[in-house]
Amino acid sequence: MADNDQSLYNLRYNQVSQNLEGFGGGSPQWTLVTLKNVDPSQVPTSRLINTTAPLMGGGNLSADRTLSMPAATGLANGYLLATDWSTFNSKQPAGSYITNLTGDVAASGPGSASATLATVNSNVGSFTSANITVDAKGRITAAANGSSAGKLLQYASFVDDVDFATTSATFVATNTTITITPTSLASKIFIVATGIGYLDNVATAAAFFTLVRNSTNLGNTAGFAKIASGASGFLENSISMSYLDSPATTSPTTYTVYIRNSDGATDVEWNPNSIVLQSVITVFELAG
């Protein structure tokens, strides 16, 4: 309506001030119209705000009502927390997954679970030189102590390149010698000695070679090897001796090549200078 409309009780809505205005008569002047609240007792309190769990806070309109909802728990419905949403959003996609293991290996999920191996052999423990039984799956189904006899426990070796000569008719020690300390009283010691023997120019003489443990001759009076010329001129032969000894000790034990002649005068040698060769003595400790 126009500003100069002086009709009494005219109303207008001022879009600029966003207020309701009335024209009061007289000079053209529009004034703010203020509405008085109705009697609060006249509010229709019979109207209700109904809520269903987990939404709470409903009731009639006789008072202010605040609607609320608790966070969901394992026992009650509610709103989804952000952390729970992240958990659900990151969950494993639907599919066919192993949740249990059975048979030779047993385990139960979900998540990390300890696996249990099926018992196929109740005889558990440590075994010496074990005898074992293995099935088609590679499992040890039986185990027991076995015999360790003959098992190599240790060895030692010595190389000698020094010429040794004697004219003795009784056995004397050469430089070919080795010491070993057995680990058990039951151990066996296997001795192997190789070298070159020399007999001088006497047709009727002979040279003898033997192995000696400490001071005990392991052979007889002729030893383990012999060379004899049977004619004029010297004789050189390869000598190889071996012996399985039972020293019955755990103390250091020395094995040595000994030589002698048959007449107490003829020269016999071990590793003669005329041949550039070496002698070797090796000892092996074997489980008894």
Image (cartoon, rainbow, N blue to C red):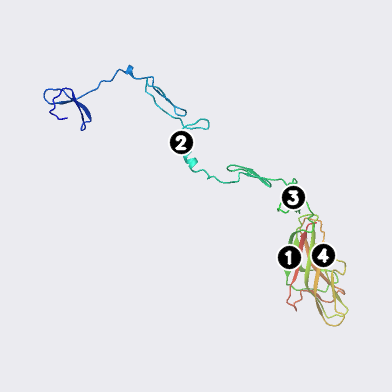
Q: Which residue is mark 1?
A: 157
Q: Which residue is mark 4?
A: 243
Query: Residues at badges 1 and 4 in contact (C-beta under 8 Å)?
Result: no
Residue beneath the point at 45% across and 38% down = 82
Dot 4, how many residues are within 10 Å of its Cα: few (below 14), some (14-19), or many (20+)? Answer: some
User: What kind of residue is marked 4?
Assistant: Tyr
Q: CA distance from mark 2 to mark 3?
A: 54 Å
**Upstream in the sequence, badge 3 or badge 1?**
3
The residue mark sitting in front, 3 or 4, is: 3
Mark number, residue 141 = 3
Residue beneath the point at 76% across and 63% down = 283
User: What kind of residue is marked 1?
Assistant: Ser
The residue mark sitting in front, 2 or 3, is: 2
Identify whether 105 is placed above or below 23.
below
Please state which of residues 41 and 263 is positioned toward the viewer in this rendering: 41
Q: Is label 2 in a helix, a strand or a loop?
A: loop
Quarter in which the C terminus is drawn? bottom right
Q: Is label 3 in a helix, a strand or a loop?
A: strand
Q: Which residue is the extreme one toward the bottom?
A: 232
Where is residue 267? Give x, y as percent.
Answer: 82, 76
Query: Residues at badges 3 and 1 in contact (C-beta under 8 Å)?
Result: no
Judged left or right of residue 154, residue 84 is: left
Judged left or right of residue 15, residue 155 is: right
**Upstream in the sequence, badge 3 or badge 4?**
3
Q: Does residue 130 appear anywhere in the picture?
A: no
Query: Residues at badges 2 and 1 in contact (C-beta under 8 Å)?
Result: no
Q: Which residue is mark 2?
A: 81
Q: CA distance from mark 2 to mark 1?
A: 79 Å
Q: CA distance from mark 3 to mark 1?
A: 41 Å
Please state which of residues 123 and 139 is positioned toward the viewer in this rendering: 139
Identify whether 53 is placed above or below 164.
above
